[in-house]
Amino acid sequence: DRNLALLVFAPNQLKSAGEFLAAELGREQAIQIIRKNPGVLSIPPASLKENLGGIVAMADYIGFFADNPLLAKLLLGALGLWAGYFVLYIGIFKPLWESPSRPF
């Protein structure tokens, strides 16, 4: 439901990633990680091994915002407003205003 891109990966890839997670984290934690971020199944086991701590943290992050969509929208909206201010004011208006040859 959350990650349709998994449909393009071979079943062996998905299975080997799932088995690796279960072996390293235990079955229950692996299931929780996969539910929060199904895309983790697209990562080869060798890469999972190198980045397991980061993958667990990212799954928690993704799961939190997937479970709290209103909060995610609010935070992304605030980020968008900040980026808009930065681009418009800092990037355009301020340089025009401070320009010695400003047109107004």
Image: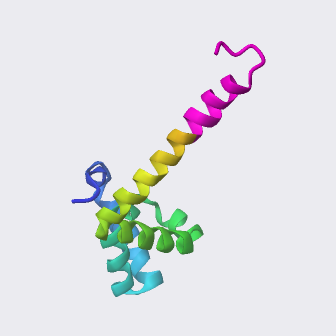
The residue shown at (64%, 15%) is 104
Within the image, what quadrant is residue 96 found in? Answer: top right
Residue 41 drawn at (x, y percent): 37, 63
Within the image, what quadrant is residue 16 found in? Answer: bottom left
The residue shown at (70%, 16%) is 102
Residue 16 seen = no
Residue segment shown in magenta = 86-104
Colouring rule applied to residues: rainbow
* Nearest the eye: 59 or 75: 75
The residue shown at (37%, 79%) is 30
* Nearest the eye: 102 or 54: 102
Residue furthest to the right: 100
Residue furthest to the front: 104
Residue furthest to the left: 1
Q: Quadrant of the N terminus?
A: bottom left
The residue shown at (53%, 65%) is 46
* Nearest the eye: 33 or 12: 33
Please count the marks in the image: 0
Q: Is residue 58 magenta?
A: no
Residue 90 seen = yes
Image side of residue 76 versus residue 85, left or right: left
Residue 48 drawn at (x, y percent): 51, 67
Which SS does the magenta portion mostly show? helix
